[in-house]
Image (cartoon, coloured by chain):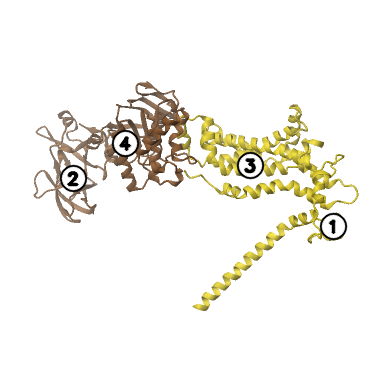
Chain colours: A yellow, B brown
Amino acid sequence: MRTEEHSARRSRQIGRVFIYGSLIALAAFYLMPLWVMTVTSLKSLDEIYGGSFIGMPKAITLEAWNKAWQEACIGTACTGLRPYFINSILMVVPAVILSTGIGAINGYILTKWRFAGANAIFGLLLFGCFLPFQAVILPMAQVLGRLHLSGTIPGLVLVHTVYGISFTTLFFRNYFITIPDELTRAAQIDGAGFFRIFFSVMLPTALPIIVVSCIWQFTQIWNDFLFGVSFTAGQSSPITVALNNIVNVTMGRKQYNVDMAAAMIAAIPTLFVYVVAGRYFVRGLTAGAVKG
Amino acid sequence: MSTLEIDRARKVYGDLEVLKEVSISIGTGDFLVLLGPSGCGKSTLLNMIAGLENISGGEIRIAGKVVNDLSPKDRDIAMVFQSYALYPTMTVRQNIEFGMKIRGVAQAERDKAVKTAADLLQMTHLLDRKPSQLSGGQRQRVAMGRAIVRQPKLFLFDEPLSNLDAKLRVDMRTEIKRLHARLGTTIVYVTHDQIEAMTLATRVAVMKDGVVQHLDDPQSVYDRPANVYVAKFVGSPSMNIIPASLDVEDGRPVAVVDIPGATAGRLTGIPLSSQAAAKYAGRSILVGIRPELFSVAGVQSPQTVSVHIDVVEPTGPDTLALFQAGGVEVTARVPPRAVAARTSATLAVDTAKIVLFDAETEKRID
């Protein structure tokens, strides 16, 4: 008996070692690019060309970061990423707020104020989730032209808001459908109207899905390249386009450290959002109803 | 506090007629229970009174005023839902205050109303909790508190006790009854539980397939059900409906019930008008006998029936004895240990309380 117990414990330990071992190995594998980016961005160009790529920097320098942020040349203007970073912020904040807000109202209407054809409309909206970006570029360019928004940040905000509505509506509709209709009915009897119910009753319960929607939209819009490169030019480009220009357009020696620092700068906001709100993201995606 | 008149109200979804010309009228302070199985239209009717469903035809009047086209908030009603429907992100206090806030009631007045309701329902200590921190019974109390502070003309309850466990359900039932006695407000209460209907109501409307089968005070519904459906739905165990034939002897009705392996039972002294007796003489009828109308008789007489008891089911205060008569299984409620299974027994019947039904239409014969 004792030996059996012993061996059972032993095999469990071996299993544990195996599980943790493989998890750590996979994590290391996935973190490798981030590691390379980080250390490269902290090295001087000479050190990189001296052959060290993966190893720790001999002397840590923030020069590349500084250069990427405010000196690197993008096209003819040597402004660094800073103005484009601001462009991206100016694009992403209104676009996230608008698309999440509209998605929330859509989801609220589709679940609590059902009308004839509500399901059909929801089905059509879902098409938007599966529509490839490339398919809408041309008609979108025409629309932006007619609205005199071509090549502007408000134009991009519009594009991302419209494109995001499909996803945000899906999120909110699926969340609100788990909230009992009796809640809206009780609020109606209490005298609350359409917007009062939305703001006082529905939105407060929807916090987890608001977080999900914001994170999702933020990453999608911040990371978007295709719309950015198609609908903007020069000074109004978002950071992803500027990053591409820094990396692809080089004169003389390729500045790997600046490229890496620029890529990190472009990635930091999404990383930050995940770190700060990541647990809400998982919780929001898995949560059903808020039990009342 | 007010009257409620439902005047030939109809509800139609496309081709489906959910309510067929329902007419119910109750007075100030009445406690109306809409009783029926799921799908009978009782909740739809309640929602129509509340204004949460529109009215396809007919009229609903609260305190004499037609409310067909008024929105829920303008009908001066309050409603308690089956799932309580408390706002999950608000505290108990905020839940109770919400309606008053919307109506623009001043803070001082709101505080007073909340305090009164909380005292009445003994939940002062719960005011700062969230609904998720409350038990089922406490949530129910909060939902009632939210309704009370409105001081409505009409309280509407939609199966408020269905989500509670058996013990709590009985307690809350008493509480609702007490509340009604104290506030005296007119109440409409939907349930599928006939005991709730019996215990709470001053008026019961038994519904089936969108039609009110019987509207009366609970005791009358119990004693003289309008038809076989009502007879079986109200009361537990339900009323025995026994096929029989009607004889008339010296102008008095006698219901003849076949009893296997014994002489047919002849039930006399049944209340029946002479016209009905004449009309149904010699025809098959249905005899409705509540289980408690049976009693164990010491000696055989023309008034008693001899039966063979199949099964006995002791319930504690009394015992249910099951036997065959008229081709159906009949339940008698007798004192504990009065009869034994697989023996013969002589039972007397309180025939003055027997109800007769037409064998075809299943409607009561008076």
Q: Which residue lies furthest to the front in this view?
A: B108
Residue contact at pointers 3 and 2, CB within 8 angstroms: no
Residue A271 vs A92, above or below: the answer is below
Q: Give the residue displayed 37% in from the left and 30% down from the top.
A: B151
Same-chain status of marks 2 and 1? no
Residue contact at pointers 4 and 2, CB within 8 angstroms: no
Closer mark to the observer between disc 2 and disc 1: 1
Q: What residue did someone put label 3 on?
A: A214
Same-chain status of marks 4 and 2? yes
Q: Mark 4 and mark 2: span between their CA atoms?
A: 49 Å
Marking on residue B179: 4
Q: Mark 2 and mark 1: span between their CA atoms?
A: 108 Å
Q: Is residue B156 visible?
A: yes
Closer mark to the observer between disc 1 and disc 3: 1
Closer mark to the observer between disc 4 and disc 2: 4
Same-chain status of marks 3 and 2? no
Residue type highlighted by circle 3: Cys
Q: Mark 1 and mark 4: span between their CA atoms?
A: 83 Å
Q: Residue furthest right?
A: A252
Q: Give the residue displayed 26% in from the left and 43% down from the top.
A: B238
Decide if residue A236 is on the left or right side of residue B235. right
Residue type highlighted by circle 4: Leu
Percent from the top left, x then y, of residue B268?
13, 39
Q: What residue did someone put label 1 on?
A: A48
**Quick one: label 4, few (<14), some, or many (20+) residues within 10 Å?**
some
Residue B55 vs A126, above or below: the answer is above
Percent from the top left, x then y, of residue A164?
66, 38
Same-chain status of marks 1 and 3? yes
B7, A281: nearer the viewer: A281
Residue type highlighted by circle 1: Ile
Marking on residue B258: 2
